Structures are given as structure tokens and as C-alpha cells.
Amino acid sequence: MTWFVEHNIRVLPWIPNPPDMNIIEHVWKHLDNRVHTMRHLPSNTNTEELWAALKEEWEAIDGDFIRHLYESMPRRVAAMRKAKGSYVKY
């Protein structure tokens, strides 16, 4: 940040990692839903079983799901700008 100030570059006040703007957060939620809800894994599932389920579901993610997330970014940015940087539900 100091470098920008020293070089007279104006930056927007923006939290470093807004979760509502981070596409991967939606992917993690999708994986969590697929692994725990769709597979009905018991709470005592061991690490190896959980890891195997996660890898399988990761490979099964539909490309259209990811494409939709990327295509939603302009709307996400517009919503955040309208909210003046505050949380937006996405």
C-alpha cells in the first residue's frame, strides 16, 4: 500500500479477501453440499474416505457451474460498487 501512496496512485478501499466476491468460496460450498448432503457421509467418516469423496466430487464439477460463476463477476462487482464496498449477498 505504501508503494501506491508514494507513487500518487489512488486505490479503492477494499477488504483484501471479500468472501462474497471470491468464486472459490462458492465452489467449496458446492463441494461441501455434494459430499455431506448428497452422499450422506456419516460424521465419523475417516480422513481417507472424506478425501476420496472430495476428489471424486471435484472431478465431477460441471463446467457450466464454473462458467456461470465467472460470468456472474460483472454483476457481483456492480452490486459491490452499488453497496459502496459493503457485503453483498452472492
Image (spheres, helix red, strand yellow):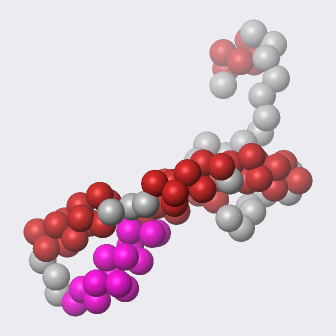
Q: Where is residue 74 in the image (x, y as percent from the top left)?
A: 74, 46
Which residue occupies 74% across, 61% down?
A: 87
Among the 4 quarters of the image, the one containing residue 68:
bottom right
Residue at position x 45%, y 69% in the image? 30
- Residue range of the region highlighted in magenta in the rendering: 29-43
Is residue 9 found left or right of 33 in the rendered image? right
**Residue 20 screen position, x and y as percent:** 64, 59
| Residue 44 lies in the magenta stretch | no
Residue 39 sits inside the magenta stretch: yes
The percent position of residue 56, horizontal first and vertical second, equals 24, 65
Foreground residue among 32 and 1: 32
Question: Looking at this view, is 66 or 9 the one in front?
Answer: 66
User: Is residue 81 or residue 75 the one in the foreground?
Assistant: 75
Q: Say if 40 sits above or below 7 in the image.
A: below
| Residue 54 appears anywhere in the view | yes
Q: Where does the N terminus fall, quadrant-wise?
A: top right
> Residue 61, relative to residue 13: is it above or below?
below
**How many tags in the picture?**
0
Quarter containing the C terminus: bottom right
